[in-house]
Amino acid sequence: MRHVIRNTAALLSQGLIVLLTLGMLAPVFYMLMMSFRTSAEIAEEPLALPQSLYLGNYANALSQMDYWQGVVNSLGITLTVTLLVALLGSMAAYPLARRTSRLGKVVVLLVALGLATPPFVTITPIYVIFRSLGLLDSYLGIVLAFTALNLPLAVFFYTSFISAIPKELEEAARLDNCNSWQIYRHIILPLLRPATATLSLFVTLMVWNDFTYPLLLLTSPEKFTVMISVYRFVGNLNIQPDMLFPAAVLGSAPLLVLFVIFQRRIVTGVTAGAVK
């Protein structure tokens, strides 16, 4: 009897997971299907499936929204920010995790407070500072802004992870005449790969999908990210479905391709971090 109850509960839980997954994927499926229909077809039957794959919407979007330049800009900014956040965050977290003084705890607390600050609160100060420094409408400015926004998460994340690494590893390295930089480079940094994979996932999503900061800090069309290109193509006054849906698909497609390519490493990193 207990065996039957357990099997029934397992089936119900699996069915619930499948339903939740389908519910989350339904908007994506709808967006993809509508991107292959004309505006008249969508207006006539909003929930119907396309009778044929009409590619004119994508051709129109690609010819008007400067899509490939936006993809290159977004990839460059995202990869640079992810690299800087991982490097600077781990370097700052290493001494904070190993020092148990009151000052170290205060610094960690201040970093944690940075996580509680809403991003829109920092928009005005960053804009004013960058205007004074001449960093507006530059790749350097947008990279520095995103790096600063994500560093509190990285430091807090790495500090917790490094605290769980046995100190005996460092003590053994010091017996071999390794200095602090060598210990960080050859011992701590390799052990941070699972944490780095998880952190990179969050940073990539945040930077790629962000709309506000590129909109305020970038003004030259050749420097726009893909999200700004999508916004300029779709507009905000008279939104046409035959423009909205293909633009949305094109905006999210490169990120999806990256996750498909690196999914094994991402899953390995997340699971390894959980085991750690």
Image: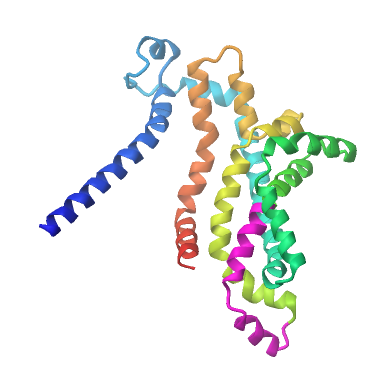
**Image coords of residue 11 (percent x, y):** 21, 48
From this viewpoint, which residue is outermost toward the left?
1
Q: Is residue 80 visible?
A: no
**Image coords of residue 35 (percent x, y):** 44, 24
- 174 above or below 213? below
**Image coords of residue 105 (percent x, y):** 71, 64
Please indicate whether residue 275 sits to the left or right of residue 141 in the image: left
From the image, give the main secondary structure of the stretch colored magenta: helix
- 114 above or below 136? below
**Image coords of residue 91 (percent x, y):** 71, 65
Please indicate whether residue 41 sits to the left or right of residue 75 in the image: left
Magenta part of the chain: 152-178
The quarter holding residue 198 reads: bottom right
Please indicate whether residue 268 sits to the left or right of residue 181 in the image: left
Task: Residue at 74%, 60% (x, y): give it.
Answer: 107
Task: Residue at 59%, 47% (x, y): give it.
Answer: 204
Q: Of 125 and 77, which appears nearest the observer?
A: 125
Task: Residue at 73%, 48% (x, y): give it.
Answer: 148
From this viewpoint, which residue is outermost toward the right?
132
Q: Is residue 59 visible?
A: yes
- 243 above or below 84? above
Q: Of 38 and 85, which appears nearest the observer?
A: 85
162 falls in the magenta region: yes
Q: Quadrant of the N terminus?
A: bottom left
